[in-house]
Structures are given as structure tokens and as C-alpha cells.
Amino acid sequence: MADRDDRTDKPEKIWIFERESPRNAAEGRSRDSEAALGPRYSRRDVLKRAGAFGAAAGLAGILAACGGGGDEAAAPPPAEPAPAEPPPAQSEPAAEPAPPATTGAAEDIKRGGRLRVGHVGGGDAEGFNPALGSTFIDASRFYNVYDPLTRVNPDFSYSPALALEWTPNADSTEWEIKLRPDVVWHDGKPFTADDVIYTMNLMGDKGHISHASVANVRLGEISKVDDLTLVVPLKSSNARLIDSFVQQNTVIVQDGSTDYTNPIGTGPFKFQEFSVGQRSLCVRNENYWEEGKPYVDEWEDISIDDETARLNALLAGEIDMMSQLSFTQARAQQDSGEVQVIDAPSPAVQVILMAVDIAPFDDPLVRQAFRLIPDRQALVDGALQGFGSVGNDLVGAGLPFFSDLPAREQDLEQAKALLAQAGKENLEVTLHTSDIVPGFVEAATLFAEMAKGAGVTVNVKKEAANAYFDTNKLYTHVDFGQSFWTVSSVGLWYEQALLSDAVWNETHWKDPEFDALIRQAQGAPDEATATDLWNQVQQIQYDEGGYIVWANPSIVDAAAQYVKGIVPSAFFNLGGWNYRDVWLDT
Amino acid sequence: MSEVAHPAPVAAPPLRARHPVAWFVVKRIFAGLLTLLVVSILVFVGTELLGDPASAILGRNATPENLAEMRELMGLDEPASERYFDWLGGLLTGDLGNSAAGYAQGGEVPIWDDIKGKLGNSFALAAITALIMVPLSLFFGVRAALRARRAEDHAISVSSLAVSSLPEFVIGSLLILAFFAWLDVLPPVSLIAPGESPFADPKKLVLPVLTLLGVTCAASIRMVRAGMIETLGTDYVQMARLNGFRERLVVWRYALRNALAPAVQVFAQNIQFLIGGIIVTEYLFAYPGIGQELVNAVSIRDVRVVQSLAIVVAAFYIVVNIIADLLVMLLVPKLRTRA
């Protein structure tokens, strides 16, 4: 019988290694029995195949992630709210912040718990350095660990935060700012004017995102009158200095601070831990200057880039609130009622832009024709699911000095006539879009459809999300594209978008007379003159500008039903990133 | 016919002939270290081409003074060769350096602290997936091979192919739909807090692991199947059967060992994919792993983090390769004397 010791009964061949071994050839093994075994793989083949499989899977993964992950990973850059007009120039902001307007009297409010908020992350760029962060998650962190000088309420009115009074001199070239007393930093030191002066000097650095806020300030000559008062001299008159100090990057940091890996602020929450790109955890500031607030014990900001994953996390109870809910999901969630959809009309705009120095858009007739192409309500319904209002090609709806000129209706015949007049019938153009902002691609596709009726062929080209708002790549370099702005001041927006040397001059509008008009309007001594000047500015843009402002999209977020105290704010997401007034009814 | 000259007998076989397996391991480790050295050079050169990290961190409007200061902090003002040896030295002593993002925040954040949690998470996920994938693939592969070209074989082949031909995020989304939206038994996201062990809440791992199994199993099953079919057709298997060995013995003890050699390579490939290649799954489930970390680091051009992660992943690949080859060697005793 055969030997039962199988261990010595080795097989003749291992087909993987046979072919490669030179000893086989040397020892002259016959190939016959090898042929009988059928097709043979060499290790090379296996690795090639498996490698291709693995590489393809990995590559597909990375491509999908980059394409999808780029979405919202860079926030729309123009989040430069300079604040809206205060009531008359000389006033100080109104009374103390009002208690939340929503549910229940003060006695119903339950204290305690951990508020977990999900946002699109900023990857490794996340941090607590106000000089650098421009995304939504940065805004969320800055506004709650630090305080600005002035806060913007949901209706765009102001409340004093760290600065109580703003008093100008006769011609508004010097402002005296009185600060709030009895404010204490998280490390126990008292808040003084030195901190404000230090912060302003930091903002003077050209690399600081908000250096425009102090561009008009004579930084070297800011003087401290006493611990709670400082005098800020300006280079030229500005009746609205307060506007420059509400934005997220203008929050006040402690005098001498350079290391933001352990940030010290005056805000409602104290920093505890941070894992960059993942989550930050902060605890209630027991010594906050707003009595009794915040209500929750802890607050966590969690980075979840994918919108569906973020919504799933909310539905599953892993987070309590999320910022930036897409319009389609908002519609669906409103219908289902599982979570509360926070819908805030806002002056934010979605635009289609035309570079006025590149053909065919250098012809004002062409620009006017294009402004007649869209059925704006259809765009709002189609691209924004109805979450927004129709735009009139001007920016700043609802804000002071906004010109409420009528929104153009769709008029394809007139558009065709104008194009014929310009000698540009049967125009063919490429509209560069991206899915970085919800609604962009849908709007572009709808616009292309509508343009056919005017004889214009629009080729919609989808660009990479992380290149779209990158000034090194596509941003401000396309001739026909889209953009998104959050706005809190007409004046500041014009400075950022339409001055000849504006950093974000998307439409390449360069007109020195226009610049002069804007500067005049900014420095106008009284409201009537200012209104008149701004009307002139806006009329020019209305007639000849490169923008098709087709909508004011609402700001849409979501929260669990047990989260109370959120007031939808026209200024920014999640009630203006207000977590002080939030409480958990669990 | 000419006589084959036999070599004169030697006194005793050299050390390496007496311990072929150990010699193999030693050789491969040296080769692996050499490979790692080459990889480190390639990684270093490659990340140099990423562009200036200082301006990526500080933004386009940063002043030249700030940029110069940041470059000094990050050590970028030294010449490339010096930086390379500094970095290499740091690697060998376990000091990966500080991250650029940390410098931007004004502090020093050691990279190891940053990535160790995410590395651990990724390894945990890969380990669990691998531990399930191997027996699963073996079981189904062998079953399919035993019933080759019959109904069960077709069923297994078709279903595994169907699943693996779906993109990762489709598999994941379907699983979320089934287990969260419909059945509500599993969480749809796998948020693991920094510092928390990934095993703290095992429910969070189920869906990502199932997704990864869906992606990797098909190739493994098919490779095991192919190998088994080959082996079951060989002479010695026929011989064993003819000699009356029990079928179970023939299949699981004799045929499988030889069929496994190529399958081990596919398992190795899959395991290498599971570290660093699963970014889509990480993104879908918001799982904090090193795939996402690598993409984040590249997008902000945090050169040190990219270099560190690349070396870690490369080292892992090499280790897996060595183990795979070792396993094949152990499975196939003949190789011990020949390799």
C-alpha cells in the first residue's frame, strides 16, 4: 500500500514557482506533466493582476474621494461679512443681547449636556488661530471660544459683545471704543484694552485674513486711555468702523498670544482638547460675562465632510446639530419631520459671473442679453428646491443701502435681439461649474437649457471642487462661471468684489471712476448722501455689470428635535454660530 | 554517455543551508530595509515636488517675513540633502518631527501624536477585515472549487463578482440603507473619538468591515477557487483519492496547502490595500483612519506628515510581503531548500 506518511509524499510541482526557477531548466525537467496542469500563473501575473485590482480600487477611491471630498472642504471664500449698517453713525449698538426668541420662558431651560455639532471639516488646516481660518468650522470655533467686539443678531442688527460704546470724533477720523468691564480670559487674566490693541496689530499683518478691517487704521497710533478704553485713529473718515469688527477673524485674542494650540479666549466655551481634522471639545466657561450662559456643559465640533454621512450622524443621534444641509435633503427632511430644518433667508447670493474683459462678455449688449436668459424663479425652484428668493443682479438684499431695483424677467426674444445687435448670434460659450456649493451644477444645467431659447449654446464644464475657489487655480480666472457670497454689508462687498484692485474681483471690473464713487460712498458723511451714492454705484452694476445675481439662497442647517434655542439668523449658519443660547431638552 | 560529475562531498552544509527558513527571513528583512531606504528617497523627492508648504499653510497673502519665519520653523531653509538625513535620523530614533499645521497654529505638535490614533484605527479595521476575509474566502473558494461548474459554484462566483464590481461607496451606502434606514440596528457613521479605542463600540465597525469584505472577498474567493481546481486535478490528489483517503482529508489537508500559494499573495494584496487604500470607505463612514489623513496632509502640503505616513505604509507593505512569502514557503516545504 502507499506510504501513509503524507509528509514525504510531496507533490511533484508547485506550479507557481516552477516556471521561474532556472534549476528546472538546468535539471531538464520535462514539460509534459506541466502542460497537463493547465494554464499556469507566474507570481508576476498574480501580482500584476492583484496589483491592478488593488491599484484601481485605491485610485478609484482616491479620485472619488477627491472629487467628492473636495466638496465643501474649502468653504466659499467670500465669507467676509463686514457688518451691516448700524443705526445712525454715532450710536453704539443697541441693548444687551436679547434672550432667545424661541421656546419657553427662562424657567423651562434645562442646563447641562454635551452639544455635538457636525460640520464640513477643514482637514489639517483646522485650528484656533483667528488669523488663518476662513471655513465654516473655523467660524464655529472662533465665535464660541473667543468673542468679537460686536455681535450680529439674526436680523442683522448689532449687539455689543466686548465693545460697549463706539464714539467718533467730529469727522469720524477717530473713534473711542469703550470696552466691557469684568470680562475675564479663560486663564483668569482680566480683559483689557491691551488685548484689543494687540489683536488689531495682528490684523495689520498682510497675511491675516481680516487685514482689510484695519487697512484704514493708523495702527502705530492706537492709544490706550485706560484699561477699558482705547482711541483708534483712522487714515480717512469712516462713519462705520464698527462694521469691520464683527467678522469671524476679528475676534479678540489675548495680548501676547502666539500659540493657538492651547487657545485662551473670553468666549462662552473654554478649550479642552482638539484633534485636528476630527473634533474639538470645549467646556462651559463658568465665568462668562453673559450671566447664566451657556446652558450646555460641553460643546464638541465634529468634522464630517460628506453631507450624507453628516445627516446620517444626525439621524442616528451621533450629533445634535449640523451645518450646511443640502437643499434636496432639506426638502425631504422637512417632509419627514424627524429633525428640525433651520431655514434662514439671508442676503447671501448665488451668481453667474461674466468677465467683462474677455470676449464675448466684453460687450455690454451680450451681458445684458445673458441677464435676460434665466427664468429666475425656475432656477430657485430647480437648483435650490425653493429655499431662496429671486435676485435682481445686485448684491445685498435686505441690507442698508441696497437698491431694490426690479429683478429681470426672462425675455428670450429680447435676448436674441440684443445678441443680434451685438453681432453674436448662435454664440457658443463654456460655463465652468463645480459641485463645491449645493445648487451650482443644477443652476448651470438649467441655465444652459434656458439659453438654447436665445440661440446660445452653453457647454457646462464641471471643474474640480478644490480648484474652483483656489485663487492659484480657477478662482477669478474664468470668463464664465459661478460664485457664492455671504454678505453683511453692501459697502464691504463692493470693496471685495468690484474695486479695480480687489482680491476677489471675479468679473475683472476695473474702472477708476467706479472706484472713486465707491470710496466716496464709503466715506459719505450722512445717510442721505450715502444712499444717493450707493444708488449710483448699484445702477451702474445693474446696467452694465458682469453679474447675474439670480438668487438669495437661504441658509439651511438641521438639528435634532430636542435642541432648543436656535434662532435662524440671516447672518450665518446655526443662528450665527450661537451656541450660548442653545439647550438640550432631553 | 558522459558521466555527470558529482561534486566532492563537503564537510558540513553551511549555516544557511541548515536553517533555510531563518536564512530566508534574514535575507528578506535586509532586502526590505534596503527597499525602505529607496522608498524614503523617493518619498522625500516626491514631496519636495508638492510645492512650498509654508505658503500652503499660511495662505496666498502671507508676507515674505511670515513665510521666511515659517520656513525656518519647519527647517525648510536647509539644503535638501541635509534635511533628508535629518529626517532619516529622526525616523530611526522614532521622532517624526512636528506638523506644519501645528506651526501654523503657533505651537509644536508632534506628528506621531497626531497620527498614532488614526494609524491604530486603520490597523484595527484592517485586522478585523483580514481575520474574517481569510477564512471566508477559503471556505467559499474551496466549496466553489469542489462543486466546480455546478450550481453552487456559479452562485458563489456570480454573487462575489457582482458585489466586488460595485464601487465601494455603493456597497457601503446599500449597507447603510439596509442596516440603518430600514432595520435601524447599526450606526450609519463610525465616529471614533480621538483617544478612544476602535473596539470600544464594536457596532461602529460592522458596516465598514462588511463594506471592505465586499470589496476584497471576490478576488480572494476566485483565487482560492482557481488554485483549488488546479490542485484537485493533479496526480497526487488523484493518487490520494485512489488510495482511499477520506475526501475531507484530501481537500483540506493536502490539496489546500498547495492551492494556497497564489491565494496567499492575493490575501497579501488585499491586506496592503486595507491600509491606506480605503479612503472611500473612511469618508463614507466618517471613520478616522490614515487614508483621510493622508489626503488631508497632501492637500495642505504638510510635507512631514505625508512623508511619515508614506514610510509607515511602505514599511507595512514590505512586512506583509515578507510574511506572505514566508507563509508560502511554510506551506510548500520544497521551497525551503530551494529559495
Image (cartoon, coloured by chain):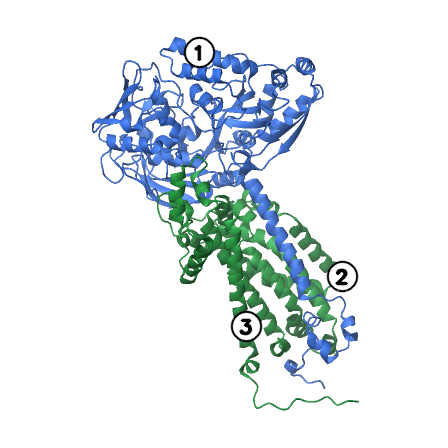
Chain colours: A blue, B green
Quarter of the figure with the C terminus of chain A: top left
For residue A251, above or below residue B81 = above
**Tag 2 secondary structure:** loop
Specify few, some or many for label 2: CA neighbours under 10 Å numbering under 14, 14-19, or 20 or more: few
The residue indicated by pointer 2 is B149
Image position, residue A465 (x, y; %): 56, 37
Image position, residue B91 (x, y; %): 43, 60
Spatial CA distance of label 3 from label 2 is 42 Å
Residue A533's disc is: 1
Horizontally, residue B3 falls left or right of residue A500, namely right
For residue A172, above or below residue A279 = above
| Camera-nearest residue between B51 and B64 | B64
Q: Chain of mark 3?
A: B
**Tag 3 secondary structure:** helix
Quarter of the figure with the N terminus of chain A: bottom right
Specify few, some or many for label 3: CA neighbours under 10 Å numbering under 14, 14-19, or 20 or more: few
Q: Amino acid at mark 3?
A: Lys
Spatial CA distance of label 2 from label 1 is 84 Å
Write the residue at 57% across / 27% down.
A482
Write the residue at 57% across / 82% down.
B17
Spatial CA distance of label 1 from label 3 is 81 Å
Write the residue at 56% across / 43% down.
A66
Residue B27's disc is: 3
Q: Quadrant of residue A211?
A: top left
